[in-house]
Structures are given as C-alpha cells and as structure tokens.
Image (cartoon, coloured by chain):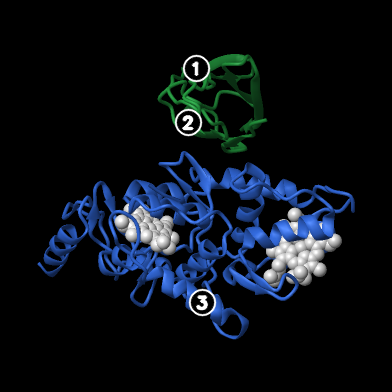
Amino acid sequence: MRKTLMAATLAAVAAGLAVQAQADPPFDPKDPKMAPFIAGAKRSGYTFAEPETRAMQDDDFTNPGFLWVEDGKKMWSKAEGKAGKACQDCHGDAEKSMKGVGTVYPRFDPHAGMLLTLEQKINQCRTERMGAAEFKFDSKPYNAIATYVKHQSFGMPIAVQTDGPVAPYFDMGRRLYYERRGMSDIACKHCHEDLAGMHMRTELLSQGMPNGFPQYRLKWQTLGSAQKRIRGCFDEVRAEPYPVDSLENTVLELYATWRANGLRVESPAVRK
Amino acid sequence: MPTPRVKMPATAAKGEIFEVKTTIDHDMESGQRKDKDGKPIPRKIINKFTVTYNGKQVFWSEWASAVSANPYCSFFLTATESGTVEMQWHDDDGQVYATSQKITVA
C-alpha cells in the first residue's frame, strides 16, 4: 500500500515515467540460496532478477560473461607493448596477486594522484609500465581483462574506502547521487533507494548495486562496465550522461559501489 | 576469432545418454540494425551448427537472425563407442569455427 502510494506520488512528480505494481520474481530473504546476495538490508540486483536470469548467472557455463573471463585469462600472460612484458611478468599468478583487488575500486591512486576505476588502473599499467596503447572504453579487451581481474575477487565483500584522500570524491559522488536531473527531474536515489522493488515500465527497480560489474546484460547482448550502466541510467531519466571516465561518472561509480560495501563480488553477473 | 566452449563428459558407459553444452562468442549481427549514419549493418551470423561423432553427423541445426549473441546450444547424444565429437559453427562470411572433444566409452 505504502509502495503504491509512493509510486503514484512519484509518477505524478516525474511525468513521463510510469511506475506500477506487477508480479515480482520470487524473493525470500530466509532462503539460504539468497544468503550470498544479501548483506543486512542491502540486496544485490541478483535478488531482483528473474529465476531464469539467476540460473544463467549461477552456471559458469551458461553465463556468457565467462567468455570474457577466459579471454582475459589469455591476455594476462600475453606480452604487449615496448617493454615486452605481460601482466603476469610483474604480477605473477592472478589468482593470488589480484585476489581482493576488485573489492576496493574505484580507489585513490597515489601514483596518478586521483581516483581511478579498476579499468583505468589497468590502462595505467599498460601505458606506463608496458609501453602499450590504452584499451578503448567498452572494447572487447578493455572489458575482458577487467572482468578477469575482478573475477579473482568473486565472493569477497566489496570494501571501497571513503576516507582520507577519497573523502572529497566521495562527497561529490553523494551530492551527484542525490541531485535531480533530466527531463524526468529525478535523482539516482529516487529509483534505487526510494523505489527499489517497484516497477518502471518493464523493469523491476533494484537497489542499483554495482557488485556484479563488469556484467553481461541481455539487453546489451554483451558485457559492459559500471561506467556504461550508469550512463544508461541517465538515459532512463532523459538526461545527458557525463562522459566516460569523467570525474563525475567516476565519483558516481564510487558512491554507488560504496552503497554495495558488504555485498559480494559477483562479476561477471548476468542481468536483464 | 570466436572461441567455442564445450562441456561434456570425458567418459560414459556404453548406451548412456549424455549432454553436450556449447557456447561461442559471436555478435550474431542480425542485419536489422542501422549504424550511426543510418546505413544498415550487414547480417553476420552463425547460420548453421553441425556435430559429428566419429565422423558421422549426429546433430545439425540451422540458425536465423533472431538467435541471440553468444549463442548457447545443448543437446544429447548416446554413447556408442570411444572417439571424437566434433562441432562446427558456420559463419555467414564462410568461416568455420571448429572444436572437438574426446570421449571414452567403457
């Protein structure tokens, strides 16, 4: 009842967005199968997904994201660039050296003196340590190596830092998360905090947790990064997205990832 | 170059029915989409998937524009004799992506 009321209010406020109640995929917080996808009141997008989508993610074989994991694995040991080095030459076995790394990005990088996403950090190793060209945003190798690295933290809780040098980025991220935007004049928080669990057109709104990125999206018919998803959410409210890898888009990724602190890394997740 | 992935048992009892699961990374460009300049993007899909067991065709499937990217296909075979199961994905552009797996039938 409360939900319906809230939805009606928002629909009135945000003209052009239809929010309505429909039948939901089953979710029982006490179901032991759901335990890995919950942390207190936080729920992974997995718990909002249809059972078919969950099943696709659960099986490493039917999960198309593993095609990227395997590609990334091959890339790990392949020398590239002027230095003639592969990731492996400096980092050794990824299963050991990259374990946990995916839980702390976006992270402040002392070397660059700024906040970096995992993808940006990998590109930094390529340009500065390997003498190789940067991977282009959303290209196959860009996504493959990031998915492989992130997958080494599979099952570990997200734990991004927000203090010290990260504090100003975090504050900016929070401000942008709560800022209304676009023709619909609504903020991230309206859809992913206030309306999580409600329907928007054919979509069931989740809490907007990025713990499964890079993730395979059936709508994209391919795998993509959190940066890409966040830009897509700007389209949802008919706003101009911030450029890829811009400060704004990166602090939004930081804030959204901090919200998921405690939820486990699912990369590569599968979503609608 | 797309990389096929296959999952099937390495051994089976004679007469046993076993499942073969396959996927391949491929965009399956439907031919229905347009690029930024409004020009149609030509169709490029895997149009045929064939399977042989010790050289004999045991499974065959024709695919069309509506098949998703990175297509998944699974099927069942009966373990008749030890040997090789070979799979071939036929691309619109004439390329064939192939992989095979051995099975021991006891």
Tell me residue A21's x, y (percent): 16, 55
Amino acid type at mark 1: Trp
Mark pair 1, 2: CA separation: 11 Å
Compared across the picture, whether A99 is left or right of A52 comes to right
Report the residue that reaches farthest toward the right.
Answer: A83
Tell me residue A261's x, y (percent): 48, 74
Name the foreground residue: B37 vs B35.
B37
Reading the chain from its start, which is encountered first: label 1 or label 2? 1
Tell me residue B41's x, y (percent): 51, 22
Q: Chain of mark 2?
A: B
Q: Colour of chain B?
A: green
Q: The N terminus of chain B lies in which quarter of the figure?
A: top right
Determine crowd level at label 1: few under 14, some 14-19, many 20+ residues with C-alpha closer than 10 A. few
Q: Would you name the residue on which mark 2 appears?
A: B73
Amino acid type at mark 2: Cys
Determine crowd level at label 2: few under 14, some 14-19, many 20+ residues with C-alpha closer than 10 A. some
Q: Secondary structure at mark 2?
A: strand
Q: Would you say the residues marked 1 and 2 are in contact, meaning their CB atoms lie under 8 Å apart?
A: no
The image quadrant of residue A250 is: bottom right
Q: Chain of mark 1?
A: B
Determine crowd level at label 3: few under 14, some 14-19, many 20+ residues with C-alpha closer than 10 A. many
Q: Residue at x 75, y 72 (%)?
A: A111
Mark pair 3, 2: CA separation: 45 Å
Please indicate, yes or no, whether residue A73 appears anywhere in the rendered image. yes
Compared across the picture, whether A186 is left or right of A217 comes to left
Q: The C terminus of chain B lies in which quarter of the figure?
A: top right
Q: Would you name the residue on which mark 3 appears?
A: A170
Q: Which mark is residue B103?
A: none
